[in-house]
Image: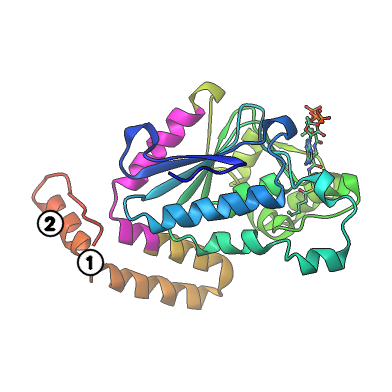
């Protein structure tokens, strides 16, 4: 497994043949998302995408922070032209190209780019002490990696406006009530619960999982009529897989399915 400077990558995670763990690893600066760290994240995601054994990716931070935002020290003197020249969001824009499900396991702060990174994953499981927020307004800027769009879709206009214009954080329970977070769990069981969720996904037919992920994401990007059509086509497509036959036969034969990923 390749070594990265700013993240840790573990596969197989906990001995599971289909689950990988990626941990952000700049603890001294609360996992501030430098350009180099984000490049590591996307390089690692693509490495796991290309590994046919991997079915689910978990992305996490540490006890204090998932990530406290983009690296302010790196950005403070930036100019718009410099950011355009260096294509600041290059790695971020590639996250949607990952077809395997990515679960964010969030402990502590998920702020600014950290909240945006969690929201770029497919689902979020949070510890009961997690804190989400877009505090950019407090440092004279605004979210830049999707916060105004994804938080608004998750919370609705008024709540998103409140959090983005004040910089106030949301606690894990409010985030769950609003639908930003799939599940809130006690801090000490965050990784166990996330692993259980990853196992539930990893033991399903991998092609159907990818098609389902793609169809849910289409709900954010298309009008209902187009989204329904997209879903219908992906539904038909699952019937080209051996795993669909296996899943339905196993149900009728009252046994566990044995999915091969084809
Ligand atoms: C660089 C950061 C950082 C960040 C924390 N640190 N967040 N460094 N960029 N985003 C560093 C601190 O400078 C400090 O370094 C160390 O991490 C510990 O942080 P403290 O502030 O001492 O911790 P604490 O008092 O517990 O406060 C935690 C905190 C606070 C509330 C999360 O650190 C904070 O407000 N951080 C900034 C949050 C933020 O504004 N995020 C948005 C960034 S802009 P030293 O060397 O002093 O020990 C953004 C735009 C995204 O994300 C655009 C798209 C990419």
User: Which segment did they paint magenta?
Assistant: 190-210
Q: Main secondary structure of the magenta part?
A: helix
Tell me the residue that label 1 is attached to.
241
Query: Which residue in the rendered view is the most extreme toward the top?
Result: 188
The quadrant of the rendering that contains the N terminus is top left
Disc 2 designates what residue?
249
Decide whether residue 122 is among the magenta residues.
no
**Of callouts 1 and 2, the N-terminal one:** 1
Q: Is residue 110 visible?
A: yes
**Residue 225: where, in percent of width, then height?**
49, 77
Determine crowd level at label 1: few under 14, some 14-19, many 20+ residues with C-alpha closer than 10 A: some
Residue 190 percent location from the top left of the image: 51, 29
Is residue 197 on the magenta stretch? yes
Task: Where is residue 95? Give x, y as percent.
Answer: 56, 59
The quarter of the picture showing ligand 1:
top right
**Mark 1 element type:** loop
User: In the figure, is residue 95 to the left or right of 114?
Assistant: left
User: Which type of secondary structure does the marked residue at label 2 adopt?
Assistant: helix
Q: Is residue 87 above or below residue 136?
A: below
């Amino acid at each position: 497994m390749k070594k990265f400077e700013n993240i840790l990558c573990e596969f197989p995670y906990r001995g599971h043949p289909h689950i990988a763990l990626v941990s952000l690893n700049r603890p001294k600066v609360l996992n501030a998302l430098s350009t180099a760290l984000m490049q590591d994240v996307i390089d690692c995601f693509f490495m796991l995408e290309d590994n046919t054994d991997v079915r689910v990716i978990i992305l996490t931070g540490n006890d204090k922070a998932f990530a406290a935002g983009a690296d302010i020290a790196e950005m403070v003197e930036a100019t718009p032209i410099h950011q355009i020249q260096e294509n600041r969001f290059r790695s971020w824009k590639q996250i949607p190209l990952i077809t395997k499900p990515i679960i964010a396991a969030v402990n502590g702060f998920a702020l600014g780019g950290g909240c945006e990174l969690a929201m770029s994953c497919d689902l979020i499981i949070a510890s009961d002490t997690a804190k989400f927020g877009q505090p950019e307004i407090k440092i004279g800027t605004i979210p830049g990696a999707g916060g105004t769009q994804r938080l608004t879709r998750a919370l609705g206009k008024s709540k998103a406006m409140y959090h983005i214009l004040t910089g106030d954080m949301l606690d894990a329970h409010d985030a769950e009530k609003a639908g930003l977070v799939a599940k809130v769990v006690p801090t000490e069981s965050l990784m166990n619960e996330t692993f259980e969720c990853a196992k539930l996904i990893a033991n399903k037919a991998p092609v159907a999982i990818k098609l389902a992920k793609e169809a849910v994401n289409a709900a954010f990007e298309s009008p209902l009529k187009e989204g329904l059509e997209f879903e219908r086509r992906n539904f038909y497509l699952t019937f080209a897989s051996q795993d669909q036959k296996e899943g339905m036969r196993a149900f009728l034969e009252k046994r566990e399915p044995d999915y091969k990923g084809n």
